[in-house]
Image (spheres, grey):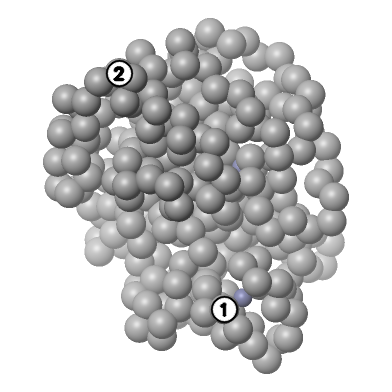
Amino acid sequence: MNNAKWDVRIERARKLAVNYPFASEGLRFYERLTRFHKSAYSQIEAACGTAKRDRPPAMLRREFDTFLLLPQFAPFLSAITEIAPVPLARFASEFRTRSGSYWQQTLVRFWEDGSGGQMNSEPFEAILSWLFLRPYAEYLADHTKSTAPKGTPSLCPLCGGKPQVGALRPEGDGATRSLICSLCATEWEYRRIVCPACGEEDVHKLAIYTAKEFNHVRVEACDSCRSYLKTVDLTKDGHAVPVVDELATIPLDLWAAEHSYQKLRTNVLGL
Ligand SMILES: [Zn+2]
Ligand SMILES: [Zn+2]
């Protein structure tokens, strides 16, 4: 049932690759990666079923199905060696020669690490783990009975992951802001004038940057902690798919880097 979401992302990536030639190489990688994710998600759903379960808040990472996931890892590494940018492809090729137990340790370490693998892992190992485990995380999130999170958490209420991108969705005469998880793609409401990295609420310290070629995407930066996040405004482009439009708007990341802002969560293109 949820397989349609992968097709929406693939189609959007194809369209944006035509509109934004400077991003076409990265979007082509994303498109091929997403095809792999779609197939992996189907296999997980076939094995685990479509029923929704109760999962307490922030407990998503308590589950890890080694027997289901490990056999998918070698085909994933092979795919990455063919489709990823050279540094990651080369690392995946080397990583293929490691033992199954080393793969398992690496994946479990990433999964159990609430920092998204940024603290305890070799960076490329964390990236491979993150890319590989996304369909599993999305499967678990999609098959969890939804409960409204308490307050407005700045990390994903289901898995504790950092937000990848924000969204403004039309509601009444205005828009509500939400954040989208970088691991399980859960989307949760978040207050508009507050930094998701440090909680800054002073509007004078929260900068917004837009560029005329991307009317519907903006950088939301914080001058207190120097972090930023991009937010996709669906009131301006109802066809946008936040996780994909975020990838395509590379010049906004370059602007942020030039102004010494650090992204809250690096995307699959390493930006
Ligand atoms: Zn999550
Ligand atoms: Zn901040």
- Give above or below for 149 relative to 260: above
Q: Label 1 amino acid? A: Cys
Quarter of the image where ligand 2 sits = bottom right
- Give above or below for 202 relative to 134: below
- Give above or below for 93 relative to 30: above
Q: Which structural element holds mark 1?
A: loop
Q: CA distance from mark 1 to mark 2?
A: 40 Å
Q: Residue furthest bottom?
A: 204
Instruction: Please name the residue that numbered disc 1 is placed on.
Output: 225
Does the rendering let one see residue 241?
no
Image spot of residue 173 (x, y percent): 82, 67
Residue 76 - label? none
- Mark positioned earlier in the residue sequence (1 or 2): 2
User: Label 2: how many residues lie within 10 Å, few (<14), some (14-19) or many (20+)?
Assistant: some
Does the rendering let one see residue 137?
yes
Image spot of residue 201 (x, y percent): 74, 79
Q: Could you tell me how many numbered marks the image carries?
A: 2
| Residue appearing at x 62%, y 10% in the figure | 49
Quick check: is the Cβ at mark 1 less than 8 Å away from ligand 2?
A: yes
Residue 100 - label? 2
Q: Is residue 69 left or right of residue 150?
A: left
| Residue appearing at x 68%, y 59% in the figure | 154
61 or 263, nearer to the observer? 61
| Residue appearing at x 46%, y 10% in the figure | 67
Q: Label 2 amino acid? A: Gly
Q: Nearer the viewer, mark 1 or mark 2?
A: 2
Where, quadrant-wise, is the C terminus in this rendering?
A: bottom left
